[in-house]
Image: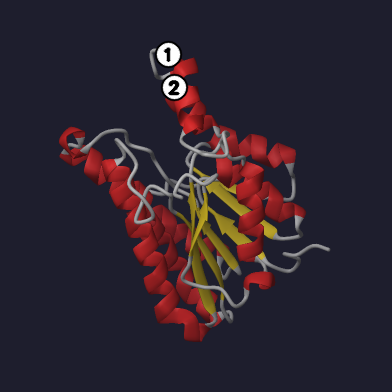
Amino acid sequence: MNRLAGKKVFLTAAGQGIGRAAALAMAAEGAEVVATDINQDALDTLAQENANIEIFQMDALDLSAIQAASARVGAVDVLFNCTGFVDNGTILECDEDSWDFSFNLNAKAQYRVMKYFLPAMIENGGGSIINMSSVASNVMGVPARFVYGASKAAVVGMTKSVAKDFVGDNIRCNCLCPATIQTPSLDDRINAFDDPEKAREEFIARQPMGRVGTTDEVSALIIYLASDESGYTTGQEFVIDGAMSL
């Protein structure tokens, strides 16, 4: 059974990691998928893997690009905001530029995408919005994740607000709060350490399950939230963290 048959989906940050896995999974479930990313090469390889996925380059930090995308794509049934950046450091190591970049990409980009896609979704009868937050947010504090946790907590707040304001328009809005997930981004952060092997062990040790999560595991939750199976669910943060927050 194709659980997303007849649904149109728009994704940001679909070039790699969770966004890429979600695009492929939703296409496999029968959705009409429109995938965007700032990295055109990554999008090209995504399209090569599934020729039915429509791709185009979009900078999620560019307001005019988001506005143009909303006009180009029109009404969607599912909106997946997957943008994010992990800034490492405490409040004492967070300068003004780091604060602004993290909030612009982790929160403001998602606010803009929701704002400009939401009117057509409402006019079309509703839909499901899925935002990418993190377990490092209001869920829990994580060492050296000051501005990342603050900006991801903002995503949770936006999610609940949109869910409350538009529940009468058949709009559902939920967010994902994962812990460490195996992605190219994680590999890049680990390889930046002087001792990558030790760093990987420390990342794994944060989860009591003794491993990091997979993009397929996150995608399975995304499929549920995108489908009609979750029709009674809105305004929730879905923690998928290998027991990290317990």
Pick out the residue farthest to the bottom: 168
Q: As rendered, which of 175 and 99 lies closer to the eye?
A: 175
Task: Identify residue type, mark 2.
Answer: Ala
* Residue in the picture at 43% in, 53% down: 133
Residue 113: x percent and y percent?
43, 60
Query: At numbered mark 2, what does the secondary structure look like: helix, strand or loop?
Result: helix
- Badge 1 is on which residue? 195
Q: As rendered, which of 93 and 95 lies closer to the eye?
A: 93
Left or right: 111, with 89 as reference point: right
Residue 123: x percent and y percent?
53, 81
* Residue in the picture at 73% in, 69% down: 6
Give the crowd class for mark 2: few <14, some 14-19, many >=20 residues within 10 Å: some
| Residue 152 against residue 2 in the figure, above or below | above
Task: Identify residue type, mark 1.
Answer: Asp
Circles 1 and 2, Cβ within 8 Å, touching? The answer is yes
| Res. 63 visible in picture | no
Left or right: 29, with 192 as reference point: right
| Residue 91 against residue 163 in the figure, above or below | above
Q: Quadrant of the N terminus?
A: bottom right
Spatial CA distance of label 1 from label 2 is: 6 Å
Residue 163: x percent and y percent?
44, 74
Q: As rendered, which of 166 and 229 lies closer to the eye?
A: 229
Pick out the residue farthest to the top: 194
Labelled disc at residue 199: 2
* Residue in the picture at 54% in, 62% down: 79
* Residue in the picture at 65% in, 62% down: 224
Residue 179: x percent and y percent?
48, 44
